[in-house]
Image (cartoon, helix red, strand yellow):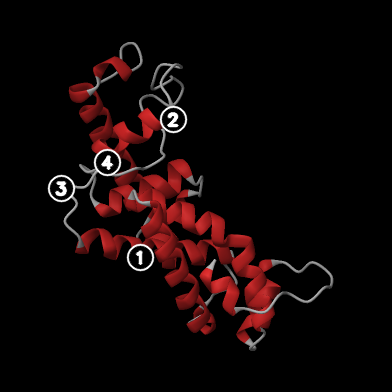
Amino acid sequence: MGLLRLLPRPMVGPLRDDRELAAAARSGDEAAFGELVRRHQGGVRRCAARILGDDEEGRDIAQAAFIRAWENLSKYDPAWSFSTWLYRIATNLAIDLLRARDSRDRTHQTHLRLVGDSEAPTAPEQVSEGEVRRIFGELAERLTPAQRAAFVLREVEGLSTAEVARAVGCTEATVRNHVFQARAVLRRELAERYPEYLPRGGGR
């Protein structure tokens, strides 16, 4: 939002895809970059907020990510989607912030679904969204920054394993391991603290 005020409005014309806009922005077209910000700021902000468990920090990270993207457009590889590149920048910034802060006494507000078996519901239908956020916020503190980032990108944002690997900067096998470990930790913590929210036969 703050960044948008600094960028010119996009010129009226034919809709261009992200790669075309990125190429134009790399040549100094600030309006093209402004359009990229408008297209992706919501997704990048939500992703960062989910990793960090804080909406304000997510907004700050998103702004920092777009500034860094503008400064490093020459490094963007159009073989990958522009959004994946943005997620990589934002994720790295979010992980750095997670590692820098002491989160043991923080109450996180993260909107993620609680995971048991993928085909089974993980919480009773009557549980409110706010309650899910609160419970996951407590459980997520047990995840490492890398586990949380991989889980958010794969399970919440719906990126492919290859895209998550690109965003987090690791191999696909490592992504699968992070997600597997995150699910195991969440399942164990859920069974210990909130067994009533497990699906029947869950917690194993």
Mark 1 — residue?
A: 92
Q: Residue at x 67, y 70 (%)?
A: 35
The nearer-to-camera label among 4 and 2 is: 2
- Mark carried by residue 129: 2
Instruction: Inspect this view and state whether residue 169 appears.
Output: no
Closer to the chain start, of discs 1 and 4, is: 1
Distance in Å between CA atoms under marks 1 and 4: 18 Å
Distance in Å between CA atoms under marks 3 and 4: 11 Å
Q: Residue 41 is drawn in which quadrant?
A: bottom right
**On screen, residue 176 above or below 203:** below
Relative side of 157 to 27, left or right: left
Q: Which amino acid type corresponds to the residue marked 4 in the rendered image? A: Ala
Q: Quadrant of the N terminus?
A: bottom right
Distance in Å between CA atoms under marks 3 and 2: 23 Å
Name the residue nearer the viewer: 100 or 20: 100
Q: Which amino acid type corresponds to the residue marked 3 in the rendered image? A: Arg
The nearer-to-camera label among 1 and 3 is: 3
Relative side of 177 to 152, left or right: left
Q: Residue 11 is drawn in which quadrant?
A: bottom right
**On screen, residue 62 above or below 21:** above
Instruction: Inspect this view and state whether residue 45 appears.
Output: yes
Name the residue nearer the viewer: 34 or 199: 34
Closer to the chain start, of discs 2 and 1, is: 1
Q: Which amino acid type corresponds to the residue marked 2 in the rendered image? A: Glu
- Mark carried by residue 140: 4
Q: Quadrant of the C terminus?
A: top left
Q: Which amino acid type corresponds to the residue marked 1 in the rendered image? A: Asn
Mark 3 — residue?
A: 104
Distance in Å between CA atoms under marks 2 and 1: 28 Å
The nearer-to-camera label among 1 and 4 is: 4
- Mark carried by residue 12: none
